[in-house]
Amino acid sequence: MATDQLRRFYQQASAWAEEARQSGWLSETDVERIKSVEARTPTELFESGTQRPLVVAFFGGTGVGKSSLLNRLAGQAVARTGVERPTSREVTIYVHKSVQIQKLPEEFPVDKVKIALHQEQNNHDILWIDMPDIDSIDTSNKQLVLEWLPHIDVLIYVVSPERYRDDRGWRLLLEHGHRHAWLFVINQWDKGQESQREDFTRLLNEAGFKHPIVLCTDSREKEHAPDDFEKLAQTIRSLANEHTIQQLETRGISLRMQELHNTLTQATEKIGSDESFAALQQHWQVIWDTTAAELEQGLAWKIDNMAESFASRDTGLLPRFKKSAPEQPASKPTTDTETIWDNWAQTRLNDVLDNLIVEADAQAIPTAPLRPKLSEIRKNAKGWTDNHLQTSLRSALLKPGTALQRFIYHSTGVLATILPLAALSWVGYRVLVGYYQSAAAPGQYLGINFTTHSLLLVVTAWLIPWLAHRKLKPSLQKAALRGLQTGLSDGLAEIGQQTRKITEELHQQQQKLHRKNEQISQQYAEPEPPAPQSSDNKTLARMLIAESTSDK
Ligand SMILES: Nc1nc2c(ncn2[C@@H]2O[C@H](COP(=O)(O)OP(=O)(O)O)[C@@H](O)[C@H]2O)c(=O)[nH]1
Ligand SMILES: [Mg+2]
């Protein structure tokens, strides 16, 4: 049944909005907008499966004559009129006894409803309601009216010649006009003038009723002048048939469904789109690249300083002579990388993350889900950077220099041992041979020249590789510098990466919400716009606000 479908649609849309609100994607107001779409219908008042009557209500300010009109219709005093009770909080229902009222509007105080049953065939298919005065000082009256409104097909807006202009009811008419069929009655016509009818009609034209039905009645109890009362009763009766009720019902439901579709669409526009997220991610790429470069530049001196503290470990060629004041303790190399990410760096990071939030806002992406996640980045940035600095510094110090450098360094070390040994072996061999030869054929034994050359040879064989070895030792300072630089850029890369991940996660959340929203919308197909002002019923057409104006 259409009413059930509307209910389900409403419930699913509300649940979706609630879920989106809980995760920060929609505001309280957005949810309220969806929830305020009317899901109640006249049909709900009656037992399902039975042919329901047309629900007609007298609507208007205090003392205009609503109760008098109902009594006149009923031919008896079913509703209390002003004589007994000037401002009525009471709702009087005048209905045929065969009609089964299933339930009254929710939250409606039952003791305020007076049901007058009748057996009159004339009003068999009409449920008449005399509504509370909408302009009473007691604002709860207006609330009562609002509770009833969604259950009403036709509203008979009753005014008096004195008070038809600044009526509170007028505002309700403008707000709820397109949801109902309206008939207008200027009661107390005994005090009225034709110009007032024209003026009132003109106001109604402006409110969207092209040819409003404006009837003038004189409902004084004792005697009254001939008036439009019969026409009023007749007009309502002409609508009280299955076909027209069905038409009104369908119109009401499709208006409500359309409104739900519209608010759902509006809500998805609030949560950003694929394009807005793509733009946000691109923006992040740009601003982070710039900021990361700035941070690397701004923190370079700190890294240089820290690397320099390793220079003392790099014993040069003539370390002792270099040290001008050897009694001063050599400055200990510091590996306290925590000091590198300082307040300045944190401020730069905070600025760039704020910039991201501003961009999200500019891209119409809600910032509520983004903010707490970015706070995590702000909190963790120092830790991440420090971690990378430590890891990278340690591994750099463990293996300073390039692989080739290290190979040559080791080779020269080995040579510094092997070459002098080889030279010594050769000298030893020559000594032995010389000794043997001088024993076999006595002559001059090796002599002073040999000694000098041998000594030179051994010393050279040792000194050259040793010097080279010392010279080629990879610099710890350079290694530290390289390690720290790599560490910093890794740290910055991680910050950039983590932030991007956040925007991606949010995009996924957004897509999920978006898909769910679409599913709901598709499940309850957008209804056709209500039939073009029911061409088969001219009277009804005059009672409805033209669609083009109701969209406002
Ligand atoms: N002069 C005049 N008085 C009327 C007319 N209709 C009702 N009244 C009186 O106006 C007062 C308020 O009427 P009531 O039906 O209670 O108005 P309600 O507050 O809109 O329900 C009562 O005293 C009625 O007798 C009318 O057409 N002309
Ligand atoms: Mg009344």
Image (cartoon, rainbow, N blue to C red):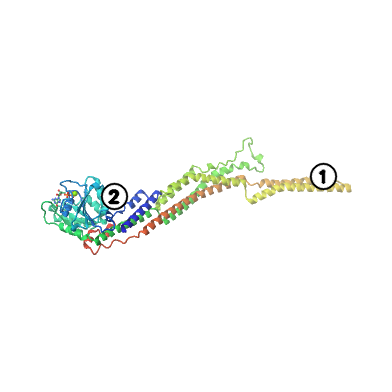
Q: Position of residue 508 (x, y in %)?
A: 44, 54
Residue at the limit of the structure toward the bottom, as seen here = 536
- From the viewer's side, name the closer residue of 312 and 239: 239
Q: Quadrant of residue 317?
A: top right
Q: Position of residue 149 (x, y in %)?
A: 26, 52
Helix, strand or loop for disc 2: loop
Q: Quadrant of residue 335?
A: top right
Q: Amino acid at mark 2?
A: Glu
Nearer to us: label 2 or label 1 = 2
Q: Residues within 10 Å of mark 1 (few under 14, many from 20)?
A: few
- From the viewer's side, name the closer residue of 405 and 32: 32
Q: Amino acid at mark 1?
A: Ile
For disc 2, the marked residue is 106
For label 1, being within 8 Å of ligand 1 is answered no
For disc 1, the marked residue is 448
In the image, which disc is placed on residue 506? none
Q: Position of residue 256 (x, y in %)?
A: 30, 56
Q: Is residue 240 above or below residue 304?
A: below
Q: Earlier in the sequence, mark 2 or mark 1?
A: 2
